[in-house]
Image (cartoon, helix red, strand yellow):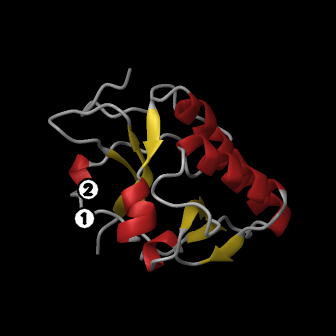
Amino acid sequence: MPYYQASVFQSSQLEHGRRFHFKEPHTSQGGWIWGSVTLPDTMDIHSDDREIIIHICNTIAAGLVTWGDRSLHGLGFNSVSFPIRIETPEQDLDELMFQVEYIALWWVPWIQSGTVTIDKHMLFVAKQPSSEREDQLLDIPLNWDQPEEMIADPWCAVTELR
């Protein structure tokens, strides 16, 4: 059973003719709860990354997050899902909402700067994580165990983002 899967977030820089996805825990792994934000029917493969991340952040701020033990985007839904490690004792809804909001907001400056893009083909067409090998995925950009702590240099040595 794989430990990681490709996230909808990917590097914007082409390297060897492709963009690399960031890794996230595989949806089959236990110990995670997934906060999913459904995208409206008005969004599609032509939607701007900024429009999508703004919708995600506004939806989270409104408290409209679907929680489950699997990522909805991995089950074929037009949504973006964020993994949150389940703590002991388990987090209450307020803590989960804080964590998913923090993770979503973490992506905003990277998308605004053009360093990171959203893989809209995966999001709207394939509706499944890409089948990249785990060793081809970029390191996760923040410490999933403690979302309030960011890793100083989150990027993998595989690609150097500018």
Residue 89, compared with residue 148, is above or below; it is below
Classed neighbour count for the residue bearing mark 1: other residues with Cα under 10 Å, few (<14), some (14–19), many (≥20)? few
The mark closer to the camera, 2 or 1, is 1
Q: Measured from the top left, where is residue 20 in percent x and y?
A: 30, 43
Residue 130, compared with residue 159, is above or below; it is below
Q: Which residue corresponds to the image point at 69% horizontal and 53% vertical from the top-left?
A: 55
Q: Is residue 39 left or right of residue 19?
A: right
Q: Which residue corresponds to the image point at 51% horizontal and 61% vertical from the top-left?
A: 44
Quadrant of the drawing holding the C terminus = top left
Is disc 2 in contact with disc 1, using a CB cutoff of under 8 Å?
Answer: no
Q: Which mark is residue 80?
A: none
Q: Which residue corresponds to the image point at 76% horizontal and 66% vertical from the top-left?
A: 91
Q: Quadrant of residue 97?
A: bottom right
Q: Which residue corresponds to the image point at 36% horizontal and 26% vertical from the top-left?
A: 161
Q: Measured from the top left, where is residue 108 in percent x and y?
A: 62, 37
Q: Is residue 84 left or right of residue 59?
A: left
The residue most toward the top is 162
For badge 1, the amino acid type reads: Ser
Q: CA distance from mark 2 to mark 1?
A: 9 Å
Residue 38, compared with residue 156, is above or below; it is below
Q: Helix or strand or loop: what does disc 1 sit on?
A: loop
Q: Measured from the top left, where is residue 40 in percent x and y?
A: 65, 67
For badge 2, the amino acid type reads: Glu
Q: Helix or strand or loop: what does disc 2 sit on?
A: helix
Work out whether residue 124 or residue 99 is closer to the camera in this orientation and state it.
Answer: 124
Quadrant of the drawing holding the N terminus = bottom left
Q: Is residue 88 left or right of residue 19?
A: right
Classed neighbour count for the residue bearing mark 2: other residues with Cα under 10 Å, few (<14), some (14–19), many (≥20)? some
One can see residue 147 in this view: no
Where is mark 1, residue-wise? 131
Q: Quadrant of residue 122?
A: bottom left
Q: Which mark is residue 134?
A: 2
